[in-house]
Image (spheres, rainbow, N blue to C red):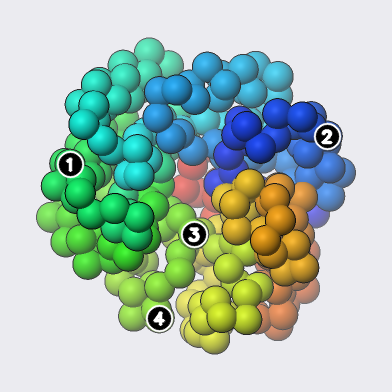
Amino acid sequence: MILTDTHTHLYSEAFDSDRSSVIERAMELGVERFFIPAIDSSYTNAMLDLEKSYPENIFLMAGLHPTHVKEDYREELAHVEEMLASRKFYAVGETGIDLYWDKTFLKEQQIAFKQQIQWAKKYAYPIVIHCREGFDEIFQILEEEKGDGLFGVFHCFTGTLEQAQKAISYNMKLGIGGVVTFKNGKIDTFLREIDLKHVVLETDSPYLAPVPYRGKRNESAYLVNVLEKMAQIYAMEKEEVAAITTANSRQVFGI
């Protein structure tokens, strides 16, 4: 059984004391591929070092996280552009709109999101979208940018059935992680109405650990807990869910 963690921040400081052990634990459970989203330029070297240590398993993205869109966002975008021009990546992201913590830079987040979509189209990469209290704003931009060149993953999807269907209409897969195991997560109530061909699995580690680890540091090994919940929801064998979602990730990321 091969699993793919389509969204994990393995370079995070949360793993500085045991990063190798975290990766080995995941691999022992069948998690063989780790897709690594960017946050901002301060993490670039750590991401490159991670790839160097596990060249067969680590797949990097380039991007600017919406919560890191600040006064210097143009310099940060210039760094993303430079990185994209310098080597191969597997996606542009994570990018999007986050209005949960701060609405001060909404306009700048919108500019940065649109710019990163344009780069994704230029390089024929998927776009990996972060959304927190920003569905309307994100859908407005996706509507402007829709077309064959727009595709990707709606990471950590926590919306409604209607929002899920709308995201899929823009050629997005739904990234499903630990929230699906939460009692108040709600997405477990309608996910079975979404064909599994539209879903990829993720952890977003070190964040959003699934039950029974909720509130603790998340890690890629806990993808098996997400898998178990998805198998229950879809009334399928775990191996079948793993095979379908990994095939979906190959389709999105091109490998």
Q: Nearer the viewer, mark 3 or mark 4?
A: 3
Report, in whole angstroms, how far the alpha carbon at label 3 lies from the one at label 4. Answer: 14 Å
Residue 227 pos. (x, y %): 71, 65
Residue drawn at the location 54% of the way across and 86% of the way down: 189
For disc 4, the marked residue is 161
Mark 2 residue type:
Ser
Task: In the rendered view, tell whether residue 31 sits above or below residue 142.
Answer: above
Q: Are marks 3 and 2 in contact (CB under 8 Å)?
A: no
Kind of element beneath mark 2: helix
Q: Name the side, left or right, on which 58 lies relative to 26.
A: left
For marks 2 and 1 on the same chain, the one whose residue lies earlier in the sequence? 2
Q: Are marks 4 and 1 in contact (CB under 8 Å)?
A: no
Residue drawn at the location 40% of the way across and 23% of the way down: 41
For disc 1, the marked residue is 108
Kind of element beneath mark 1: helix
Kind of element beneath mark 3: loop
Report, in whole angstroms, how far the alpha carbon at label 2 lies from the one at label 1. Answer: 38 Å
For marks 4 and 2 on the same chain, the one whose residue lies earlier in the sequence? 2
Determine which of the numbered discs, if any, sits on residue 21 in the image.
Answer: 2
Q: Are marks 3 and 4 in contact (CB under 8 Å)?
A: no
